[in-house]
Amino acid sequence: GAVVSQHPSWVICKSGTSVKIECRSLDFQATTMFWYRQFPKQSLMLMATSNEGSKATYEQGVEKDKFLINHASLTLSTLTVTSAHPEDSSFYICSAITGYHNEQFFGPGTRLTVL
Amino acid sequence: GQNIDQPTEMTATEGAIVQINCTYQTSGFNGLFWYQQHAGEAPTFLSYNVLDGLEEKGRFSSFLSRSKGYSYLLLKELQMKDSASYLCAVRHTGRRALTFGSGTRLQVQP
């Protein structure tokens, strides 16, 4: 099956710093990638849709200047949390789809803790 | 918009059968997905329904009724490892992203 990786799997940073999270499709080309955020005991909330070679589409309430998304190739999307604050601490999960599958393939997630 | 409802928690016994229900409201339906998520891990795909009826895959089955905005996930021969959260997600017409329900935490007891 299709494999999606994320790096890092966890990160701890100081308030005010920026953190970059990578999402890679390892054995397929992802026309579209999605970034979700999940707080403890809550469901996944879509943050943005990332299409290769174009600007990301952000969901209502998600600050695009704070959560920078770059989808430079068909196998890589990055999410940068700029000037992170403790309230940004969460589980960030990416997913990818191709033109051939109906299901989304999820990465293993990145747990961000901002001190 | 989309509104997805599923029970918050369920408890079942090892070896038994459990049904997790999901109701949704959407102005444009284009598929319903079920995912399993263990604590601290990413969701894993279980099933996909876009037409009415039952889809069976081993111990797991999923049912859809589009006219009723209703789906269920049926787990048979429950095992302890089935203890997890089960997420119902709907794809809206014209969007490739999914909208997830709040998830149902299933606890399987011996």
Image (spheres, coloured by chain):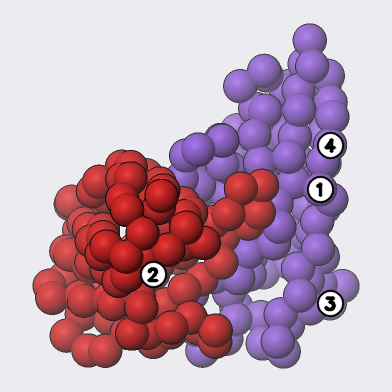
Instruction: Name the amino acid type tagged 2.
Output: Phe
Tell me: A84 left or right of B64. left
Tell me: B91 left or right of B110. left
Element carrying mark 4? strand
Residue B67's tag is: 3
Looking at this view, name the residue that lies furthest to the left.
A73
Q: How far apart are marks 4 and 1 (CA)?
A: 7 Å
Judging from the image, mark 4 belongs to the subunit labelled: B
Q: Which chain is red?
A: A
Instruction: Name the amino acid type tagged 4.
Output: Met
Residue under disc 4 on the same chain as residue under disc 1: yes
For disc 2, the neighbor class at 10 Å (few under 14, some 14 to 19, many from 20) is: many
Element carrying mark 1? loop
Q: Name the residue under label 2.
A: A34
Disc 4, disc 2: CB below 8 Å?
no
Q: Between disc 3 and disc 4, whose residue precedes?
A: 4
Instruction: Name the amino acid type tagged 3.
Output: Ser
Q: Name the residue under label 1.
A: B8
Element carrying mark 3? loop
Q: For the C terminus of chain B, which image quadrant? A: top right
Element carrying mark 2? strand
Judging from the image, mark 1 belongs to the subunit labelled: B
Compare residues A100 and A110 and report the one nearer the observer. A110
Residue A75: where, in percent of width, then height? Answer: 16, 64
Residue A89's tag is: none
Q: Which of marks 1 and 3 is in front?
A: 1
Compare residues B89 and B56 and report the one nearer the observer. B89
Q: Distance between the residues labelled 4 and 2?
A: 29 Å
In the image, residue A112 sits, relative to residue B9, either above or below, namely: below
Q: How far apart are marks 3 and 2 (CA)?
A: 29 Å
